[in-house]
Image (tube, coloured by chain):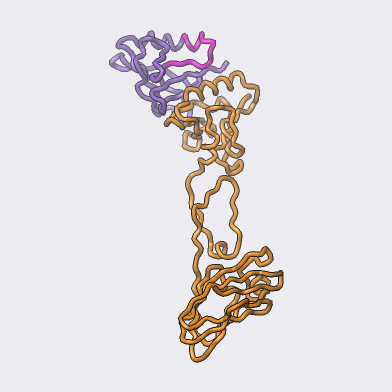
Chain colours: A purple, B orange
Protein backbone atom coordinates (compact mmCIF):
# COMPACT_ATOMS: atom_id res chain seq x y z
CA UNK A 1 0.00 0.00 0.00
CA UNK A 2 1.25 3.44 -0.92
CA UNK A 3 0.71 5.84 1.97
CA UNK A 4 0.43 9.62 1.83
CA UNK A 5 0.69 12.37 4.42
CA UNK A 6 -1.65 15.33 4.35
CA UNK A 7 -0.97 18.82 5.73
CA UNK A 8 -3.22 21.86 5.40
CA UNK A 9 -2.82 25.38 6.72
CA UNK A 10 -5.77 26.98 4.90
CA UNK A 11 -8.16 25.91 2.14
CA UNK A 12 -5.68 27.40 -0.30
CA UNK A 13 -2.43 26.21 1.26
CA UNK A 14 -1.70 22.55 1.81
CA UNK A 15 0.26 19.58 0.56
CA UNK A 16 0.01 15.85 0.05
CA UNK A 17 3.25 13.89 0.03
CA UNK A 18 3.98 10.23 -0.47
CA UNK A 19 5.73 8.72 2.53
CA UNK A 20 8.78 8.13 0.37
CA UNK A 21 9.28 11.90 0.18
CA UNK A 22 10.03 12.07 3.90
CA UNK A 23 13.69 12.71 4.55
CA UNK A 24 14.04 13.90 8.13
CA UNK A 25 12.55 15.65 11.12
CA UNK A 26 14.31 18.60 12.62
CA UNK A 27 13.43 20.17 15.95
CA UNK A 28 14.17 23.86 16.24
CA UNK A 29 16.25 25.43 18.99
CA UNK A 30 13.18 26.52 20.92
CA UNK A 31 11.74 23.01 20.90
CA UNK A 32 8.41 24.30 19.71
CA UNK A 33 8.58 23.46 16.03
CA UNK A 34 9.20 20.36 13.97
CA UNK A 35 10.44 20.86 10.45
CA UNK A 36 9.69 17.97 8.15
CA UNK A 37 12.30 17.88 5.40
CA UNK A 38 11.30 16.40 2.09
CA UNK A 39 13.33 14.06 -0.02
CA UNK A 40 13.49 15.84 -3.35
CA UNK A 41 16.49 14.25 -5.08
CA UNK A 42 16.71 17.07 -7.56
CA UNK A 43 17.16 19.68 -4.84
CA UNK A 44 18.83 17.97 -1.92
CA UNK A 45 19.93 21.14 -0.25
CA UNK A 46 17.03 23.37 -1.12
CA UNK A 47 14.43 24.26 1.45
CA UNK A 48 11.62 21.76 0.97
CA UNK A 49 10.06 21.93 4.36
CA UNK A 50 6.75 21.53 6.12
CA UNK A 51 6.82 23.18 9.53
CA UNK A 52 4.64 22.10 12.41
CA UNK A 53 4.17 24.18 15.53
CA UNK A 54 4.11 22.02 18.61
CA UNK A 55 3.81 22.55 22.34
CA UNK A 56 7.23 23.29 23.78
CA UNK A 57 9.35 20.25 24.43
CA UNK A 58 6.85 17.86 22.89
CA UNK A 59 8.48 17.44 19.50
CA UNK A 60 9.69 13.92 20.12
CA UNK A 61 6.28 12.41 20.92
CA UNK A 62 4.90 14.22 17.86
CA UNK A 63 7.54 12.60 15.67
CA UNK A 64 6.79 9.26 17.27
CA UNK A 65 3.10 9.72 16.54
CA UNK A 66 3.80 10.48 12.88
CA UNK A 67 6.03 7.43 12.59
CA UNK A 68 3.44 5.26 14.26
CA UNK A 69 0.70 6.52 11.95
CA UNK A 70 2.80 5.71 8.94
CA UNK A 71 3.56 2.28 10.31
CA UNK A 72 0.15 1.27 11.57
CA UNK A 73 -2.59 3.21 9.77
CA UNK A 74 -4.78 1.01 7.63
CA UNK A 75 -6.00 4.10 5.76
CA UNK A 76 -3.33 5.19 3.27
CA UNK A 77 -4.55 8.80 3.55
CA UNK A 78 -2.94 10.00 6.77
CA UNK A 79 -3.83 13.41 8.12
CA UNK A 80 -0.82 14.77 9.99
CA UNK A 81 -2.06 18.31 10.52
CA UNK A 82 -5.14 20.07 9.20
CA UNK A 83 -5.70 23.55 10.57
CA UNK A 84 -8.99 23.92 8.69
CA UNK A 85 -10.71 20.90 10.21
CA UNK A 86 -8.57 20.95 13.38
CA UNK A 87 -7.39 17.40 12.89
CA UNK A 88 -3.93 16.43 14.11
CA UNK A 89 -2.10 13.17 14.39
CA UNK A 90 -0.97 14.18 17.85
CA UNK A 91 -2.56 16.46 20.40
CA UNK A 92 0.60 18.50 20.85
CA UNK A 93 0.60 19.75 17.29
CA UNK A 94 -0.87 23.24 17.54
CA UNK A 95 -0.82 24.32 13.88
CA UNK A 96 0.94 24.14 10.55
CA UNK A 97 3.69 26.74 10.52
CA UNK A 98 4.65 27.00 6.86
CA UNK A 99 4.78 24.89 3.75
CA UNK A 100 7.83 25.69 1.65
CA UNK A 101 8.22 23.67 -1.52
CA UNK B 1 3.35 0.04 -12.64
CA UNK B 2 0.94 2.95 -12.57
CA UNK B 3 1.50 6.28 -14.20
CA UNK B 4 -0.06 9.73 -14.16
CA UNK B 5 -1.32 11.47 -17.28
CA UNK B 6 -1.58 15.26 -17.20
CA UNK B 7 -2.69 17.35 -20.14
CA UNK B 8 -3.84 20.80 -19.05
CA UNK B 9 -4.40 22.30 -22.46
CA UNK B 10 -7.17 21.61 -24.93
CA UNK B 11 -4.78 21.71 -27.85
CA UNK B 12 -4.85 17.98 -28.64
CA UNK B 13 -2.03 16.21 -26.80
CA UNK B 14 0.56 18.90 -27.28
CA UNK B 15 2.65 19.31 -24.16
CA UNK B 16 1.00 16.48 -22.25
CA UNK B 17 2.99 14.72 -19.51
CA UNK B 18 3.03 11.15 -18.31
CA UNK B 19 5.25 9.86 -15.53
CA UNK B 20 5.31 7.00 -13.07
CA UNK B 21 3.92 7.41 -9.58
CA UNK B 22 7.30 7.18 -7.92
CA UNK B 23 8.40 10.33 -9.74
CA UNK B 24 5.86 12.41 -7.84
CA UNK B 25 7.20 13.85 -4.61
CA UNK B 26 4.37 16.20 -3.63
CA UNK B 27 1.01 17.65 -4.59
CA UNK B 28 0.82 21.20 -3.35
CA UNK B 29 -2.22 23.40 -2.92
CA UNK B 30 -1.23 26.92 -4.00
CA UNK B 31 -4.65 28.50 -3.95
CA UNK B 32 -8.17 27.28 -3.49
CA UNK B 33 -8.33 25.98 -7.06
CA UNK B 34 -4.75 24.95 -7.76
CA UNK B 35 -3.15 21.56 -7.19
CA UNK B 36 0.49 21.62 -8.27
CA UNK B 37 2.00 18.24 -9.07
CA UNK B 38 5.70 18.30 -8.21
CA UNK B 39 7.70 15.65 -9.99
CA UNK B 40 11.29 15.02 -10.83
CA UNK B 41 10.49 13.22 -14.03
CA UNK B 42 13.43 14.84 -15.74
CA UNK B 43 15.65 14.66 -12.62
CA UNK B 44 15.90 18.42 -12.66
CA UNK B 45 13.97 20.55 -10.26
CA UNK B 46 12.45 23.11 -12.54
CA UNK B 47 9.16 24.62 -13.53
CA UNK B 48 9.02 22.09 -16.32
CA UNK B 49 8.40 19.41 -13.71
CA UNK B 50 5.55 21.24 -12.04
CA UNK B 51 2.07 20.84 -13.41
CA UNK B 52 -0.83 22.91 -12.14
CA UNK B 53 -4.18 21.19 -12.25
CA UNK B 54 -7.38 23.10 -11.61
CA UNK B 55 -9.59 21.66 -8.90
CA UNK B 56 -12.97 22.65 -7.54
CA UNK B 57 -12.62 25.59 -5.18
CA UNK B 58 -11.67 24.59 -1.63
CA UNK B 59 -11.68 20.88 -2.46
CA UNK B 60 -7.98 20.11 -2.09
CA UNK B 61 -8.49 17.71 0.77
CA UNK B 62 -11.26 15.87 -1.06
CA UNK B 63 -9.11 15.70 -4.15
CA UNK B 64 -6.22 14.27 -2.13
CA UNK B 65 -8.48 11.56 -0.71
CA UNK B 66 -9.59 10.67 -4.22
CA UNK B 67 -6.00 10.58 -5.40
CA UNK B 68 -4.80 8.29 -2.63
CA UNK B 69 -7.73 5.97 -3.20
CA UNK B 70 -7.11 5.81 -6.94
CA UNK B 71 -3.39 5.17 -6.46
CA UNK B 72 -4.01 2.29 -4.08
CA UNK B 73 -7.25 0.77 -5.28
CA UNK B 74 -7.84 1.98 -8.83
CA UNK B 75 -7.81 -0.65 -11.55
CA UNK B 76 -6.46 1.42 -14.39
CA UNK B 77 -2.69 1.46 -14.92
CA UNK B 78 -2.80 5.04 -16.18
CA UNK B 79 -4.41 7.58 -13.87
CA UNK B 80 -5.81 10.47 -15.83
CA UNK B 81 -5.35 13.50 -13.60
CA UNK B 82 -6.62 15.78 -16.31
CA UNK B 83 -7.15 15.29 -20.01
CA UNK B 84 -8.22 18.73 -21.17
CA UNK B 85 -8.30 17.56 -24.75
CA UNK B 86 -11.33 15.41 -23.96
CA UNK B 87 -12.46 17.16 -20.75
CA UNK B 88 -12.08 14.06 -18.60
CA UNK B 89 -10.42 13.19 -15.31
CA UNK B 90 -10.31 10.21 -12.98
CA UNK B 91 -11.23 12.57 -10.16
CA UNK B 92 -14.52 14.24 -9.37
CA UNK B 93 -12.84 17.26 -7.82
CA UNK B 94 -10.75 18.13 -10.82
CA UNK B 95 -12.39 20.95 -12.69
CA UNK B 96 -12.25 19.76 -16.28
CA UNK B 97 -13.91 22.82 -17.74
CA UNK B 98 -11.46 25.20 -16.10
CA UNK B 99 -8.49 23.15 -17.18
CA UNK B 100 -9.75 23.08 -20.73
CA UNK B 101 -9.47 26.84 -20.74
CA UNK B 102 -6.16 26.95 -18.96
CA UNK B 103 -4.17 27.98 -21.97
CA UNK B 104 -2.20 31.12 -21.33
CA UNK B 105 -3.65 34.22 -22.84
CA UNK B 106 -2.38 34.99 -26.29
CA UNK B 107 -2.96 37.27 -29.18
CA UNK B 108 -3.62 36.48 -32.79
CA UNK B 109 -2.89 38.77 -35.69
CA UNK B 110 -5.29 38.44 -38.57
CA UNK B 111 -3.98 39.65 -41.88
CA UNK B 112 -5.87 42.04 -44.08
CA UNK B 113 -6.29 39.40 -46.75
CA UNK B 114 -8.01 37.09 -44.28
CA UNK B 115 -10.31 39.84 -43.11
CA UNK B 116 -11.40 40.76 -46.57
CA UNK B 117 -11.33 37.63 -48.61
CA UNK B 118 -11.14 34.40 -46.72
CA UNK B 119 -12.77 32.40 -43.99
CA UNK B 120 -11.36 32.55 -40.50
CA UNK B 121 -12.01 29.39 -38.53
CA UNK B 122 -10.99 28.02 -35.15
CA UNK B 123 -11.36 24.77 -33.30
CA UNK B 124 -11.69 24.05 -29.60
CA UNK B 125 -12.65 26.75 -27.17
CA UNK B 126 -12.49 29.96 -29.11
CA UNK B 127 -13.89 33.36 -28.55
CA UNK B 128 -13.94 36.22 -30.96
CA UNK B 129 -14.96 39.32 -29.10
CA UNK B 130 -14.71 41.56 -32.10
CA UNK B 131 -13.20 41.61 -35.51
CA UNK B 132 -12.78 45.02 -37.00
CA UNK B 133 -12.80 45.01 -40.76
CA UNK B 134 -10.13 47.14 -42.24
CA UNK B 135 -11.40 49.83 -44.53
CA UNK B 136 -9.31 50.22 -47.67
CA UNK B 137 -9.55 53.65 -49.26
CA UNK B 138 -9.12 53.87 -53.01
CA UNK B 139 -8.75 57.36 -54.44
CA UNK B 140 -9.30 57.92 -58.17
CA UNK B 141 -8.93 61.33 -59.79
CA UNK B 142 -10.20 61.18 -63.36
CA UNK B 143 -13.33 61.65 -65.40
CA UNK B 144 -13.68 57.94 -66.03
CA UNK B 145 -12.50 55.45 -63.50
CA UNK B 146 -12.08 51.71 -63.80
CA UNK B 147 -11.22 49.80 -60.70
CA UNK B 148 -9.79 46.35 -60.44
CA UNK B 149 -11.18 43.44 -58.49
CA UNK B 150 -8.17 43.69 -56.20
CA UNK B 151 -9.29 47.17 -55.24
CA UNK B 152 -12.89 46.19 -54.58
CA UNK B 153 -12.81 44.76 -51.10
CA UNK B 154 -15.79 44.21 -48.91
CA UNK B 155 -16.07 47.44 -46.94
CA UNK B 156 -13.76 49.45 -49.17
CA UNK B 157 -14.23 53.18 -49.59
CA UNK B 158 -13.86 54.32 -53.22
CA UNK B 159 -13.34 58.04 -53.56
CA UNK B 160 -13.82 59.29 -57.09
CA UNK B 161 -13.01 62.90 -57.94
CA UNK B 162 -14.94 63.42 -61.14
CA UNK B 163 -13.73 66.31 -63.31
CA UNK B 164 -14.25 67.93 -66.69
CA UNK B 165 -17.42 66.17 -67.83
CA UNK B 166 -19.91 63.43 -67.01
CA UNK B 167 -17.94 60.32 -66.24
CA UNK B 168 -18.22 56.64 -65.58
CA UNK B 169 -17.21 54.42 -62.78
CA UNK B 170 -16.68 50.92 -64.11
CA UNK B 171 -16.66 47.88 -61.88
CA UNK B 172 -14.69 44.66 -62.50
CA UNK B 173 -16.03 41.80 -64.52
CA UNK B 174 -17.76 38.84 -62.94
CA UNK B 175 -14.76 36.61 -63.57
CA UNK B 176 -12.42 39.03 -61.90
CA UNK B 177 -14.64 39.34 -58.87
CA UNK B 178 -14.69 35.57 -58.57
CA UNK B 179 -10.93 35.43 -58.15
CA UNK B 180 -10.58 33.67 -61.48
CA UNK B 181 -9.79 36.73 -63.49
CA UNK B 182 -6.42 38.10 -64.36
CA UNK B 183 -6.55 40.82 -61.71
CA UNK B 184 -7.59 38.57 -58.87
CA UNK B 185 -10.93 38.93 -57.15
CA UNK B 186 -12.04 39.50 -53.63
CA UNK B 187 -15.08 37.44 -52.89
CA UNK B 188 -16.28 33.86 -52.76
CA UNK B 189 -18.77 34.50 -55.47
CA UNK B 190 -20.18 31.03 -56.02
CA UNK B 191 -21.20 30.70 -52.38
CA UNK B 192 -23.72 33.48 -52.88
CA UNK B 193 -21.91 36.07 -50.83
CA UNK B 194 -22.77 39.66 -51.52
CA UNK B 195 -20.06 42.29 -51.70
CA UNK B 196 -20.69 45.69 -50.20
CA UNK B 197 -18.53 48.76 -50.52
CA UNK B 198 -18.91 52.52 -50.50
CA UNK B 199 -18.61 55.08 -53.26
CA UNK B 200 -18.00 58.80 -52.80
CA UNK B 201 -18.30 61.25 -55.69
CA UNK B 202 -16.33 64.20 -54.37
CA UNK B 203 -15.86 65.74 -57.82
CA UNK B 204 -17.97 68.27 -59.66
CA UNK B 205 -19.59 65.99 -62.25
CA UNK B 206 -22.31 63.34 -62.30
CA UNK B 207 -20.90 59.83 -62.55
CA UNK B 208 -22.63 56.74 -63.91
CA UNK B 209 -21.75 53.42 -62.34
CA UNK B 210 -21.14 50.86 -65.07
CA UNK B 211 -21.01 47.12 -64.69
CA UNK B 212 -18.19 44.99 -66.02
CA UNK B 213 -18.77 41.87 -68.07
CA UNK B 214 -21.40 39.69 -66.45
CA UNK B 215 -22.81 42.47 -64.31
CA UNK B 216 -26.09 44.38 -64.51
CA UNK B 217 -26.80 47.64 -62.76
CA UNK B 218 -30.33 47.46 -61.41
CA UNK B 219 -32.18 50.76 -60.95
CA UNK B 220 -30.46 54.08 -60.60
CA UNK B 221 -26.86 54.03 -61.84
CA UNK B 222 -25.92 57.68 -61.45
CA UNK B 223 -24.31 59.44 -58.54
CA UNK B 224 -24.46 63.21 -58.61
CA UNK B 225 -21.64 65.50 -57.56
CA UNK B 226 -21.03 65.48 -53.85
CA UNK B 227 -23.19 62.42 -53.24
CA UNK B 228 -22.32 59.05 -51.71
CA UNK B 229 -23.63 55.58 -52.48
CA UNK B 230 -23.50 52.16 -51.00
CA UNK B 231 -22.91 49.63 -53.75
CA UNK B 232 -24.09 46.07 -53.29
CA UNK B 233 -22.95 43.37 -55.70
CA UNK B 234 -25.18 40.33 -55.52
CA UNK B 235 -24.37 37.13 -57.42
CA UNK B 236 -27.22 35.81 -59.52
CA UNK B 237 -25.35 32.87 -61.01
CA UNK B 238 -21.78 31.71 -61.31
CA UNK B 239 -21.28 34.03 -64.24
CA UNK B 240 -23.56 36.96 -63.51
CA UNK B 241 -24.30 39.47 -60.80
CA UNK B 242 -26.54 42.43 -60.11
CA UNK B 243 -25.36 45.78 -58.84
CA UNK B 244 -27.51 47.95 -56.62
CA UNK B 245 -26.86 51.52 -55.55
CA UNK B 246 -28.41 52.81 -52.34
Q: Residue at x 51, y 8 (%)?
A: A72
Q: Residue at x 58, y 57 (%)?
A: B120
**Can you say whether A61 is above or below B101 in the image?**
above
Position of residue A15 in the picture relative to residue B214 (left or right): left
Q: How many marks?
A: 0
Residue B3 placement (x, y as % from top left): 60, 28
Residue B219 placement (x, y as % from top left): 60, 77
Front-lying residue, B245 or B14: B245
**Can you say whether A16 is above or below B125 in the image?**
above
Q: Residue at x 53, y 15 (%)?
A: A76
Q: Which quarter of the figure has residue B78? A: top right
Q: Residue at x 49, y 68 (%)?
A: B135
Q: Find the magenta span and give its range.
A: A68-80
Front-lying residue, A86 or B242: B242
Residue B147 seen: yes
**Can you say whether B126 is above or below B89 in the image?**
below
Q: Quadrant of the C terminus of chain B?
A: bottom right
Q: Quadrant of the N terminus of chain B?
A: top right
Q: Residue furthest front?
A: B219
Residue B188 placement (x, y as % from top left): 65, 65
Residue A74 within the magenta-colored segment of the rendering: yes
Residue B147 placement (x, y as % from top left): 57, 79
Front-lying residue, A39 or B161: B161
Front-lying residue, B201 or B81: B201
Q: Residue furthest left?
A: A30
Residue B71 within the magenta-colored segment of the rendering: no
Position of residue B209 in the picture relative to residue B139 (left or right): right
Amino acid sequence: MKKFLFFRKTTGDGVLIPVESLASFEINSSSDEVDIKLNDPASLYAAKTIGLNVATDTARPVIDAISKAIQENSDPFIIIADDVDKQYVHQNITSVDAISL
Amino acid sequence: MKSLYINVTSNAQDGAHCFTLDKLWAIECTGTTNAVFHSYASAIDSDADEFTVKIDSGKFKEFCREYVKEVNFGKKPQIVVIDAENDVSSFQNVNTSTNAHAVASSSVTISTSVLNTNTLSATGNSTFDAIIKETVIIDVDSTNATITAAQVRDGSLLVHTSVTGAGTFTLPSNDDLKSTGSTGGQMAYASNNALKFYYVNDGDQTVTVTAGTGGTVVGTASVVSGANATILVVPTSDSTHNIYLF
